[in-house]
Amino acid sequence: MVDVELTAEQSALRDVLVDFAERELRPAGPACDVRGRVPADLEAKLHALGVTTPQVGASENGGMSPLDYLIATEELACGDPGIAYGALSTGHAALILGLCGSPEQQTAYLPSLADGELGSVLYYEGWGRRAAEIEASAAGDPAGWSLNGEKFFVANPAAAAVSIMFAIDIGTGDLRAFVFESTPPGYVLGSDDRVTPNCGLRAAHTGAVAIRHLRVPPDAVLPGRGIDLARALGWMRLTVPVVAIGAARAANAYAAAYAQERVAFGRPISAFQGVAFLVADADTAIDAARLSVWSAANELDRITDVAVLDDLVSSTVARVCAAMERVTRDAVQVLGGSGFVKDHPVEYWWRSAMTLAAIDTDPLAVPGIV
């Protein structure tokens, strides 16, 4: 059972972010999508909120829980999914370090990330691969580790000050995480999405990276492993469907308002069942998706089996992203031919949801996709 009642602190956080998203992110979104970047002053305002690079831990100590983080994510994404995803993916390195890093690693890297230096996590390999399906490898020896693999949707490619790479330890078969700075030898930029833009999320600086025999010292491996690493990874991966929920919320709200203003045959088109049902069904799908993600977030600290947790996160990501892609597509349909032109923002939210679905959706996990 998911408690849908927010605490006073969560309600206050949401209210602050709703105002910020409407006032700062929504107006800036279209220009950022065209230019493929976010103005430095807006990036600074986002970082100052303290939610994109979260301090994890007990709330009484200023920390955020997974549910706190996802509530904040949805509100920022409803303002603009591209800007929100860019800021959040930049902060994921701090999230992983805070949950799984050693005290020495946290002391070395977290202060600079908290001050606004760019971070990056190299995890995604396409087609919703689960942790057990990761192909990137790590070979250990007395001198350190040799990392190899190819990663996609990497935040701040070739620009991150601190990067975390997920790879399979070929000696044990376990998933491990490694930290390194900048772009050491063996870090090869495959593509920069600012040069060859994605379908959506263009405000987020991402790219593809190849890791070729990149050497890191023995102390580069994060001590968190097993269920601890799976929980941290689940927290990060749930960001993707929640950004999609934010985009879908914005698209459906716009479509509902349009349907009340657009008149056909002497009546607002919202009076016709074919339109009204699309909007109502979308509201239901969004609420169901939110509860699904909240339920998964609440299970992160309860599940103790890595495979069970991986299954839960992967299926949640896939189902929610697929559902939000349908919601944003239906919002475009409400506007008819006008939905496909940039005079209206619904096509942007649809492109954003499609791009999010491409990051971490396993088609085999969603009946009806294939």
Image (spheres, rainbow, N blue to C red):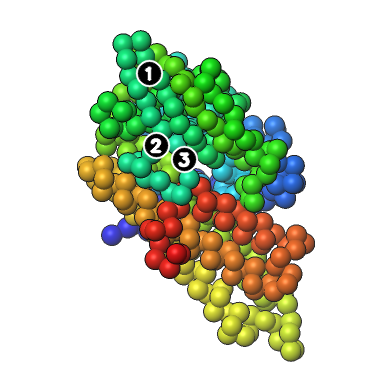
Instruction: Residue 138: give x, y in percent of width and height.
Output: 37, 25
Q: Tell me the CA gap for discs 1 and 2.
A: 16 Å
Instruction: Residue 227: give x, y in percent of width and height.
Output: 27, 37
User: Would you place residue 306 above or below residue 221 in this image?
Assistant: below
Quarter the N terminus occupies: bottom left
Q: Residue furthest bottom?
A: 265
Relative side of 263 to 57, left or right: right
Asked if residue 10 can be seen in this view, the reply is: no
Q: Residue furthest left?
A: 304
Q: Could you say whether the residue bearing mark 1 is in a helix, strand or loop?
A: strand
Query: Where is residue 325, by image quadrant?
Result: bottom right
Asked if residue 176 can be seen in this view, the reply is: yes
- Could you tell which of marks 3 and 1 lies nearer the N-terminus? 3
- Could you tell which of marks 2 and 3 lies nearer the N-terminus? 3
Q: Tell me the CA gap for discs 2 and 3.
A: 10 Å
Residue that numbered label 1 is attached to: 145
Residue that numbered label 3 is attached to: 124
User: Would you place residue 218 above or below residue 305 in this image?
Assistant: above
Badge 1 crowding class, 10 Å Cα cut-off, few under 14, some 14 to 19, many 20 or more, is many
Residue at the (32%, 28%) spot, across then down: 169
Three-letter code for the amino acid on which mark 2 is drawn: Glu
Residue at the (37%, 50%) spot, across then down: 314
Residue that numbered label 2 is attached to: 135
Three-letter code for the amino acid on which mark 1 is drawn: Trp
Q: Could you say whether the residue bearing mark 2 is in a helix, strand or loop?
A: loop
In this figure, what is the number of numbered marks? 3
